Image (cartoon, rainbow, N blue to C red):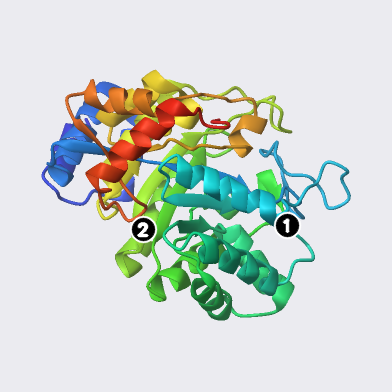
Amino acid sequence: MIQATLEKAKSGERISPAEGLELLRSRDLTAIGSAANHVTSRMHPEPYRTYNIDRNINYSNICTAVCDFCAFYRTPTSHEGYVLERDELLEKVAETVALGGNQILMQGGLHPKFKLEWYEELLQDIKAKFPKVNIHAFSPPEIYHFTKVNKLSLHEVLSRLKVAGLGSLPGGGAEILVDRVRKEITRGKVLADDWLNVMRVWHELGGIGSATMMFGHVETLEDRMEHLTRLRDLQDETGGFLAFICWTFQPENTDMSHLPPSGAFEYLLNQAVARLFLDNIPNIQSSWVTQGLKVGQLAMLYGANDMGSLMIEENVVAEAGTVHYLTLDQIRAAIEELGFEARQRDVFYNLVDPQLEQFAIQASRKRLPVCIG
C-alpha cells in the first residue's frame, strides 16, 4: 500500500501530508526505514557522518509557564529555583572549549523579571571572553516571553540579541505545533503560530536554527503530521532550518508520568517518516540522549546523518530520569561501525579542522565530561 509513496520520496519527489500520515499509520518500519536511509544517502553522498561537541547550559530553571511534561522547571517562588552566577556560567564555557567544543546551547525558563538588557549582557560577556564560540541560545518560547516582558517587537528583540552575540536559535519548546495539544500539556507558553513566527523573523534576519519535535504523549498521528507540515511550510518560506531533531517524551518524574513511554520502534518510525517528508531540511540528528547508544546508532540507518552532540552537560532530560552517557570515542565508534568516517562539525555543519578535531579527541580522553544526560 505504501510502496508508491516510498518510491516517490526516494526519487526526490515531494510527498503530501496525507501520504506522510499513511506512512505513520502503516507501521512498516523496515520499508520506511530503508527508504529513509536511501534518501539520506542521496542527500548526503559524502563518506562521513558528523557529530558536534557542545554543552547545554541552563542559566536558570525559574519559569512562569507550567508544563506537565517538564521535570526541570521551578516556579518563581520555589526554594529550588536558581540563576547561575556569571562566573560559574563562564567557567562552564571555558570547560567546553577545553574539551574541543565550539558551541554552547544555552536555555532557561521564562523568568518573570529579567529585562532584555540582562540577556544582552550575558551574550556580550560570553563573546568577550570566547569570541569563537557560537552561542546557540534562547528557544522560541523564551524569545516570545522576552517580547512580552519588555513590550518590544520580535524584530527588535531578535535584532538586539543578534548584535549582542546570539549566533543561532535552537528549536526547543516546539513539542507538537498543534494548539489543542499545547493547551492540554502546558499553560502560559507560546502557541504554535507564535513559535513559528519567532523562527520566521529570526530567519528573515539572516539567522539559522534547528527544528524539533517531542512526541509520544497526548498527540495523535494526525497531530504529528500537522507539526511536520508546518515546519516544512516555514522552511519553504525561509530556508532557515539546518537540522531537525525528534525524540520521545520522557515521562518519569513529570506530571504526565502515568503515560507509558514510547519505545525505539516509535522513535525510529517517526524519524524515518520525518526524513522522507522534510525534503527541504538538510540534516537529521539522532537523539541518542533519550534513546541510548544502540538505538541512537540505529537511527543513522533510519534517516539521520548526524549523531548529534557529545553534550558535555544536559539537565532537562536528566531531570526526567533519562541519563545516557556516551564518550566521544563511543560516538565516533558508533559512526565508524556503520562504515562512515566520523567528523566533528560546527552548528552550520561545516567540518572542523582535522587538527582541532584531534585536539578534541585527545582532550576528551584526558578528562571526562561533567554530565551527559
Lower position in the chain sequence, tag 1 or tag 2:
1
Residue at the spot x=48%, y=38% of the render?
Answer: 311
In the drawing, does residue 341 fall left or right of residue 107? left
Q: Position of residue 258 (x, y in %)?
A: 69, 24
Q: Which residue in the structure is indicated by mark 1?
A: 188
The answer to whether residue 16 shows anywhere in this view is yes
Above/below status of 272 relative to 345: above
Q: Position of residue 9 (x, y in %)?
A: 18, 43
Q: Nearer the viewer, residue 320 or 161?
A: 161
Question: Which amino acid does the dot numbered 2 rest on?
Answer: Phe
| Pair 1/2: label in front | 2
Q: Which residue in the structure is indicated by mark 2?
A: 241
Above/below status of 158 relative to 112: below
| SS category of the residue bearing label 1 | loop
Check whether the beta carbons of the residues at disc 1 and disc 2 lie within 8 A of each other.
no
In the drawing, does residue 263 fall left or right of residue 301? right
* Marks 1 and 2, how far apart at CA: 26 Å
| SS category of the residue bearing label 2 | strand
**Quarter assignment of residue 373:** top right
Q: Position of residue 108 (x, y in %)?
A: 65, 52
**Quarter assignment of residue 78:** top right
Question: Which amino acid does the dot numbered 1 rest on?
Answer: Gly
Residue at the spot x=41%, y=50% of the render?
Answer: 102
Q: Nearer the viewer, residue 198 or 105?
A: 105
